[in-house]
Image (cartoon, rainbow, N blue to C red):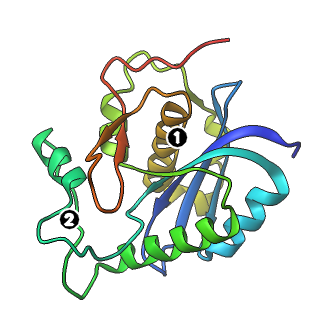
């Protein structure tokens, strides 16, 4: 693969399920590759070897537990918009997939310090897709092993669309005062620039 200019979306599962990712070519507005890894270091190697990644969007918080007295403001804003977020807890035990999300964020921030990273929420991204020009070639989903993870690959692709929106300044940030950072979503009228 040549070094394409890309943004990447990552859907997070627990340690057993791992991470599902989608690579979106910025100029082509096309998801050009999907991947599955259980180790964050393998994702780093993949990105360093093959891509010029402009932004990573992750469907999971950077920390598995929060310190504040209240719930996250970004999650409260999602709930006000009619979504049902999985709340980040204040007290242990943390949800296993959120522990894995924190592990991913730590490795990516350490190994790819120049690549901006955001948190996103695929369900909200899907609600802003009207008139979206992003394409997902169905042949990227070929193979029996991939079939059982279709939902995860679709969520990763939605995260990649969220990454593109943030990269082009078209995302909405929920919870700008959130202790873990904003969650980026799309406005209902989101339309990617066409070149």
Q: Residue 87 carries which label?
A: 2
Left or right position of 13 against 168: left
Residue 78, image x and y in percent? 20, 46
**Closer to us: 83 or 170:** 170
Name the residue: 80% across, 38% down.
Answer: 4
Q: Name the residue under label 1.
A: 163
Q: Which residue is drawn at 46% across and 38% down?
A: 162
**Residue 148: image tag:** none
Query: Which comes sooner in the sequence, label 1 or label 2?
Result: 2
Viewed as shown, does residue 150 lie left or right of 186? right
Question: Is 74 located above or below residue 66 in the figure?
Answer: above
Q: Residue 30: percent from the left, percent from the top?
A: 65, 30
Residue 11 location in percent, x, y?
A: 47, 58
Q: Determine whether 92 is above or below 103 in the image.
A: below
Q: Quadrant of residue 189?
A: top left
Viewport quadrant of the C terminus: top right
What is the quadrant of residue 31 in the picture? Answer: top right
Dot 1 alpha-carbon crowd within 10 angstroms: few under 14, some 14 to 19, many 20 or more: many
């Amino acid at each position: 693969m040549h070094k394409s200019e890309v943004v990447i979306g990552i859907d997070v599962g627990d340690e057993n399920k791992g991470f599902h990712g989608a690579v979106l070519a910025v100029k082509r507005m096309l998801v050009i590759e999907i991947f599955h890894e259980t180790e964050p270091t393998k994702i780093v190697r993949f990105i360093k070897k093959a891509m010029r990644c402009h932004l990573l969007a992750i469907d999971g918080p950077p920390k598995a537990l929060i310190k504040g007295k209240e719930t996250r403001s970004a999650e409260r804003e999602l709930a006000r918009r009619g979504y049902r977020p999985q709340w980040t807890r204040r007290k242990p035990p943390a949800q296993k997939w959120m522990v894995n999300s924190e592990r991913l964020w730590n490795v990516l921030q350490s190994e790819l310090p120049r690549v901006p990273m955001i948190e996103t929420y695929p369900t909200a991204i899907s609600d802003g897709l009207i008139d979206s020009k992003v394409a997902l070639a169905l042949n990227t989903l070929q193979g029996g092993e991939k079939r059982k993870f279709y939902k995860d690959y679709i969520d990763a692709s939605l995260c990649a669309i969220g990454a593109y929106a943030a990269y082009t300044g078209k995302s909405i940030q929920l919870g700008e005062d959130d202790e873990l950072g904003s969650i980026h979503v799309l406005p209902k009228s989101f339309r990617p620039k066409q070149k």
